[in-house]
Amino acid sequence: MTDHDTYIAAAPEQFRLLLAQLRAQLASTLPDAEEVIEYKMPGFRIGKSIIAGYAAFTKQCGLYLSPGAIAAHADEISATGLKASKTGVTFSARKPIPDDLVERLALASRKDLGL
């Protein structure tokens, strides 16, 4: 994959709209970030740090952030019924991640990384 458009177009059909919306939300929240493909995954980078990345899998999608951002919003993530790991939140077409939570997580990841 060379860019976000190509990645989204190659994703499972049921996730393409979700990924496009997530990309737009992250671009709006992180306007000074550069869109990159790192580790075969689209992301938003400032300097040498990836602030947020996303991916599509067979049955779900993931939003990947700094561990501090996930920890700071663990209760909110849980309250939405989504699952989180140390660095990511998984979601599906049936249970998408709310836009306002995406914004808070992206800003928290940026802050956690000192950017």
Image (cartoon, grey):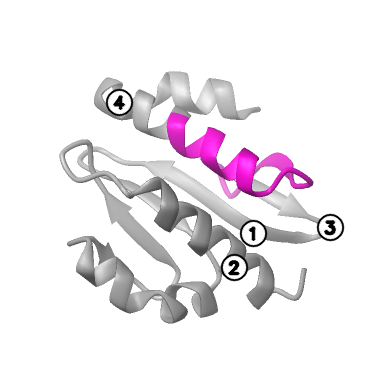
Q: Residue at x 48, y 58 (%)?
A: 64
Circle 2 residue: 109
Circle 4 residue: 12
Percent of width and height locating residue 86: 40, 76
Q: Residue at x 67, y 58 (%)?
A: 50
Percent of width and height locating residue 41: 54, 43
Percent of width and height locating residue 60: 25, 44
Mark nearer the N terminus (4 vs 3)? 4
Q: How far is mark 1 from mark 3, CA to CA?
A: 10 Å
Circle 3 residue: 47
Q: How far is mark 1 from mark 4, CA to CA?
A: 24 Å
Q: Quadrant of residue 51?
A: bottom right
Q: Residue at x 31, y 41 (%)?
A: 57
Mark 2 near mark 3, Cβ–Cβ under 8 Å?
Answer: no
Mark 2 near mark 1, Cβ–Cβ under 8 Å?
Answer: yes
Of the residues shown, which amino acid type is indicated by label 4? Pro
User: Tag 2's secondary structure?
Assistant: helix
Circle 1 residue: 51
Q: How far is mark 4 from mark 3, CA to CA?
A: 31 Å
User: Tag 4's secondary structure?
Assistant: loop
